[in-house]
Amino acid sequence: MKKLVVIYSGGMDSFTALNKAVKEGFDVYALSFDYGQKHNKELIYAQNVCNELNVPHKILDIKSISTLFTSSSLVSDDINVPDGHYEADNMKSTVVPNRNMILISLAIGYAVDIEAEGVWYGAHSGDHLIYPDCRPEFVKVMDQASKVANFEPVYVHAPYLNTDKIGILKDGIKMGLDYSKTWTCYQGKEKACGTCGSCVERLEAFQANNIDDPVQYSI
Amino acid sequence: MKKLVVIYSGGMDSFTALNKAVKEGFDVYALSFDYGQKHNKELIYAQNVCNELNVPHKILDIKSISTLFTSSSLVSDDINVPDGHYEADNMKSTVVPNRNMILISLAIGYAVDIEAEGVWYGAHSGDHLIYPDCRPEFVKVMDQASKVANFEPVYVHAPYLNTDKIGILKDGIKMGLDYSKTWTCYQGKEKACGTCGSCVERLEAFQANNIDDPVQYSI
């Protein structure tokens, strides 16, 4: 079986990608990052899913990199995570500078070490406007960089690059996935807030697919 | 003054690159990595040089990434660092998988955060055969990736990409640099060992330039 590293945050996009990789017959190794998020609820969800799927799961502690950055609300206590819909200006402060390149680089290193052939990550078309490192041209050039960076080439692939969150959920429902096993909310409370950009987008995706989100919300 | 991030290990290549950047009038920010080397002597040397040059210096702790890797002698206690000249087969075990992509990705993130225009790193032509991520095609594609990965493009440049260690030293001597301020040896003892691949290459560079290495050796 071909080995594959899947970057897995515990949210619904990478949960769907992870399950897709398993169903396609890859020998999947999941990699999550503790990069100093304000809560680790999504990592606990990720761990539980990997246990159920019998997928080896590493959580890499990269909290120290927050000492490089001063401008992101996701890692800084001084800046609040903005509420409301994802829109470029509103959500710019949630960008950890160069985050995806950093995470993908680490995942490629892990892939080289375990002799995996590729790295999957959950970029999708809904993110293109907000995060430059979710765009097709970025995925393409990272794939090229990865193929020349090591003795054994590793490819980089985003299986949902040209799909939006609605389409990802549609695919996951078709696969019979249970989305109560995912955590999306930026806040780490008992119930999801339903008002942060992440929750709003998630709820819209469920609504567009005409199904109820199994996650409980406080609104 | 234009801001620049220089990846600075404390060794002679990046020491020369750092000084070159300062002399060319950039507003230089030095970035070193504690990636779990067996000693931190080179980091102490790096700190001292930055203090003298009045260059802001960050040492980023990325020791945790060694938990991803099992195959590198530089970070694993189970594998000895090989002695002798750098040769592809012999030194392959010193490769931390995908190291340069990881370090450059972090440096780009830092550059974005402080609004620097570029990242320099010390790849040189002597490393091409040994480290795939020191080759011109890698630098070129990382530069391309960096320019699309963030809202503000950051370039990636290796000022000595087409120069070997002998040429780097020649350039540094021309700049009047004092190489007693650099540490190259893989071992972290009081005197440099003179026998590891790093020492052997360094000594050859001084010999080729017909000057004495100011660093003390135990051989």
Image (tube, coloured by chain):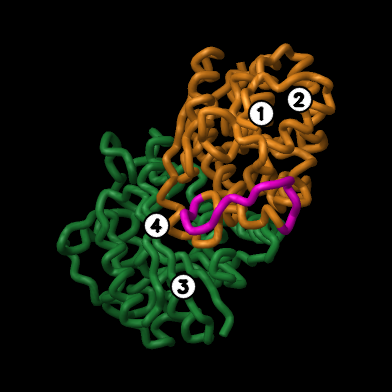
Chain colours: A green, B orange
| Left-right relation of A57 to A21 | left
Q: Which mark is residue A29?
A: 3
| Residue kind at label 2, given as amino acid type | Leu
Q: Which residue is mark 2?
A: B169
Q: Is residue B21 visible?
A: yes
Q: Which mark is residue B12?
A: 1
Callout 4 touching callout 1 (CB < 8 Å) = no
Callout 2 touching callout 1 (CB < 8 Å) = yes
**In terms of secondary structure, where does tag 4 sit?**
strand
Count every numbered label the image shows and give the total: 4
Counting from the top left corner in percent of width and height, residue A176 is at 37, 87
Q: Which residue is mark 4?
A: A60
Q: State the separation of the CA atoms marked 2 and 1.
A: 8 Å
Both labels 3 and 1 in a single chain: no
| Left-right relation of A7 to A152 | left
| Residue kind at label 4, given as amino acid type | Leu
| Residue kind at label 1, given as amino acid type | Met
